[in-house]
Image (cartoon, helix red, strand yellow):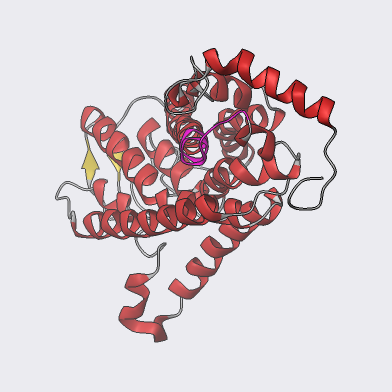
Amino acid sequence: MSENGVHTDPAALDELTDAAEHTHSGVGADGAVEGYRARRTLRLGVELRRQLRRRRTQLVLGFVVLLPFILVVAFEIGESSPNRRSGGFVDLATASAPNFVVLALFVSGTFLLPTIVALFFGDTIASEASWSSLKYLLAMPVPRHRLLRQKAIASGLLSVVALVLLPLVALVAGLIFYGAGDAVSPTGDAIPFGQSLIAIGLSTVYVVIQLAWVAGLALLLSVLTDAPLGAVGGAVLAAILSQILDQITALGTLRNYLPTHYSYGWMDLIATDIDWTNMAAGTLSAVIYATVFTLLAARRFATKDITS
C-alpha cells in the first residue's frame, strides 16, 4: 500500500520502473523528451490548411466574393444614374468603379465585416473546447501561449484575406460594369482613378486595423466560454450596441470612447483635401482596445482549467 492509501500492484510498479529506465535515454537534461520542440507544435501552415478546409471558412469567403455581384444585380434591377455627380454614397455607387468599392465597404461595415472577424476569432478556442479536443492539444503537448498565438495568427490572416477580398472583387466588378472613372464624394470632390486606388488601399488598411478591437474581444470571449456561438455572438452584439450608443447625441464627447465611433473614418480619404484626424483617433482607439482584450485573453487562458 502506498503512502496515500492507494494499493499498488508490485508487478505493475516494476514494469513502470523498467519502462522509465528504457525511455530515460530519450529524455533530455531538462526532463523533456529528446526531439521535442515547442516551436514545432501546431505549425501555422497546418492550422491554416485545417481552417481553410472548414465549410465555415469556405462559405464566408464565397459570400464575400459574391456580395459585389449581388449589389450589381440590385442596381441593375433598380433605377440608377451612372452620370450622377451628387448625392450620398449609395446614389454615387454606379458613377465609377472606385465609387462602387466605396459603397461595398460602406454597406458591409456596419454588420458584415465585424461579423466575419468575430466569426474567425470567436471560434478559435471555444470550438476546440466544444469538440472536447482542447485538452488533447495541450497534452500533445502544445504550450498554452503557443496554442493561443497560433490560432490567433491563423484567424487574423483569414480575416485579412476576407477584408481585402471584398474591395478587390468589388473593384473588378465595378470596372466590368461601370468602368474606370473618378471617385466622386458626396461633397462633390472628384479624385482621379489612380489616386482613388491609393485611397481604396488605405481605406482597406484602416478597416483592418479598426476591426482589431472586434478580434481581441472575440478572442477573449472564446477563452471565457466553451460555446463558439456565444463568443461570436457576444462580439457582434458588442459592436451593434456600440453603434447604437454612438447614435445617441446626448452622450456628447463620451461617444468618442466607443470602439465604433471612428469606424467610417476611412471615408475622409475620398476627398481632395484629406483630414487625418478621425483615422488617427480611430487607429489609436482600436489598438488600445485590441491590446487590452488580447492581454486579458492570454492571461485568462494561461490560468484556465481545461476540462474539455
Judged from this view, the residue extending furthest toward the bottom is 250
Q: Is residue 227 something that shows in the picture?
A: yes
Tally the marks.
0
Q: Is 267 in front, or is 245?
A: 245
Quarter of the image for the C terminus: give it. top right
Q: Is 9 in front, or is 266?
A: 9
Above or below: residue 108 compared with residue 57: below
Above or below: residue 198 compared with residue 124: above
Residue at the (34%, 83%) spot, across then down: 252
Residue at the (52%, 36%) spot, across then down: 147
Above or below: residue 69 compared with residue 18: below
Q: Position of residue 47 (x, y in %)?
A: 56, 25
Residues shaded magenta:
140-151
Quarter of the image for the N terminus: give it. top right
> Is 217 positioned to the left or the right of 268 in the image?
right
Residue 46 picture quarter? top right
> Is 29 positioned to the left or the right of 129 in the image?
left
Question: Does residue 146 show up magenta in the picture?
Answer: yes
> Is 72 positioned to the left or the right of 82 in the image?
right
Residue at the (32%, 71%) spot, across then down: 256
Question: Does residue 92 show up magenta in the picture?
Answer: no
Q: Is 188 in front, or is 58?
A: 58
Q: Position of residue 182 (x, y in %)?
A: 28, 34
Q: Position of residue 186 (x, y in %)?
A: 32, 53
Q: Is residue 88 something that shows in the picture?
A: no
Q: Position of residue 66 (x, y in %)?
A: 61, 29
What secondary structure predominates along the stretch shown in magenta? helix
